[in-house]
Amino acid sequence: MAIGDEHVFREHESEAPAVIGADYIAEREGMEPSQAYLPSKRVLEQDTEVTFELRRLADGRLAVLAYSSLDSLVACCGELQPWASLPEDKVEEVQRRSGADLVLWDAQLPDEQRNDGEEETRQ
């Protein structure tokens, strides 16, 4: 006896599909879920974890930076900023697991925090 949508399971073979959040909705509609781009430490091919960069705000709160597009991340953080992407609906989980107080979307970094490779502008 099978319970559920047999066509969904057929596509995933032995792996159950996502059933909560944007991944599931996008999957059902045949679309890719919206991605968020987060500044990270440099990731190497053999790495099994990603370390996202957090920023301390002037008021003392800790923020996760998230960007709605790769173009936005590059424009706001610099051309040499390492990054990782993940489904947009997972950003709150990154916030929770990192202990950050909030998520800032598409925030422009001050020149001294940008990663453009121009060391003289950051001194």
Image (cartoon, helix red, strand yellow):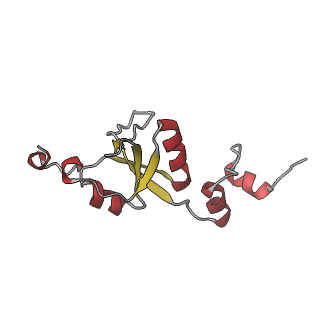
Q: Is residue 47 above or below residue 118?
A: above
Query: In percent of the image, x 61 and y 55: which residue is there?
Result: 23
Farthest left residue? 120
Q: Please tell me in which quadrant of the rendered image residue 74 appears.
A: bottom left
Farthest front residue? 59
Counting every numbered tag in the picture gives 0
Query: In percent of the image, x 35 and y 45: which residue is there?
Result: 59
Q: Is residue 73 left or right of residue 7?
A: left
Q: Where is residue 26 in the image (x, y as percent from the top left)?
A: 62, 62
Front-lying residue, 30 or 10 = 30
Front-lying residue, 72 or 23 = 72
Q: In which quarter of the image is the C terminus?
A: top left
Q: Please tell me in which quadrant of the rendered image residue 63 appears.
A: top left
Query: In percent of the image, x 80 and y 56: which residue is there?
Result: 5
Query: In percent of the image, x 38 and y 59: which residue is there?
Result: 106
Q: Position of residue 29 (x, y in %)?
A: 65, 66
Front-lying residue, 102 or 22 = 102
Q: Where is residue 99 in the image (x, y as percent from the top left)?
A: 48, 37
Q: Is residue 69 above or below residue 84?
A: below
Q: Position of residue 47 (x, y in %)?
A: 40, 33
